Image (tube, rainbow, N blue to C red):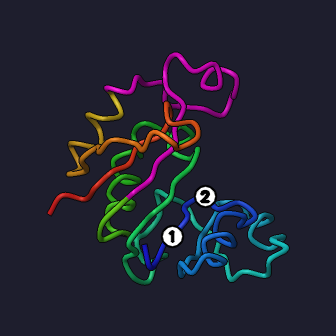
Amino acid sequence: PATALEVGCGLGHRVFCMNQVGIKADGFDISEWAVKSNSYKLPLTVGDVTGAVSQVKYPRDLVVCYDILEHVEEIHLPKALDNLKAWTNKWILVSVPMIGDPNLMNDSTHKIFWTREQWTEAFAKKGLAVVPTPENFLFKHQLFVLEVLK
């Protein structure tokens, strides 16, 4: 991708790396501390995946959303998915622990406890098609590569 947005970027590690390999990337995180503390001096912003789309100025080729959606209240998930879709013109990469993954139950801040099939269905309802995750991706079992359907 030429452009990318990381939703829930924390201290900006992935944003920094993407910029280092030539991808124009930025990000936002719900933690004001993380945004202000990024040692890369990136212009990260404070924001929430369920917030207003105005947080993001233009659609990117890729939106990265690692370990965020399981923390959203189920009632707010449709808004979060609408936002992810609005923030990209092509691809979304989501990492989310699912039923069967011990990490799902080991974090008391997790709010959504779904199977892969339930996530796939939620994405499909929003016009997001799950495409095969490349075999060489780490943690492939909890990744979704999503294509925005026109």
- Apparent side of residue 87 relative to residue 143 in the rendered image (left or right): left
- Outermost residue toward the left in this view: 150
Amino acid marked by disc 2? Gly
Reading the image, the residue beneath label 1 is: 5
Residue at screen point 43% across, 69% down: 52
Amino acid marked by disc 1? Leu
x%, y% of residue 55?
Answer: 49, 75
Please rate how many residues cluster around mark 1, counting C-alpha atoms within 10 Å: few if below 14, some from 14 to 19, many from 20. many
- Apparent side of residue 124 relative to residue 79 in the rendered image (left or right): left
User: Answer yes or no: do the residues labelled 2 and 1 have beta carbons within 8 Å?
Assistant: no
Residue at screen point 40% across, 71% down: 53
- Outermost residue toward the front in this view: 136
The answer to whether residue 131 is magenta is no
**Residue 144 vertical placement versus 149 (above, below):** above
x%, y% of residue 26?
Answer: 58, 76
Residue at screen point 57% across, 40% down: 71
Quadrant including the C terminus? bottom left
Residue at screen point 22% across, 42% down: 124
**Residue 20 vertical placement versus 83 (above, below):** below
x%, y% of residue 108?
Answer: 69, 27
Highlighted magenta segment, given as a residue range: 92-117
Please rate how many residues cluster around mark 2, counting C-alpha atoms within 10 Å: few if below 14, some from 14 to 19, many from 20. many
- Apparent side of residue 90 relative to residue 72 in the rendered image (left or right): left
- SS state under label 2: loop
Instruction: Compute the Cα span from label 2 to label 1.
Output: 10 Å
Q: Nearer the viewer, residue 119 or 23?
A: 23
- Apparent side of residue 114 relative to residue 122 in the rendered image (left or right): right
Reading the image, the residue beneath label 2 is: 8
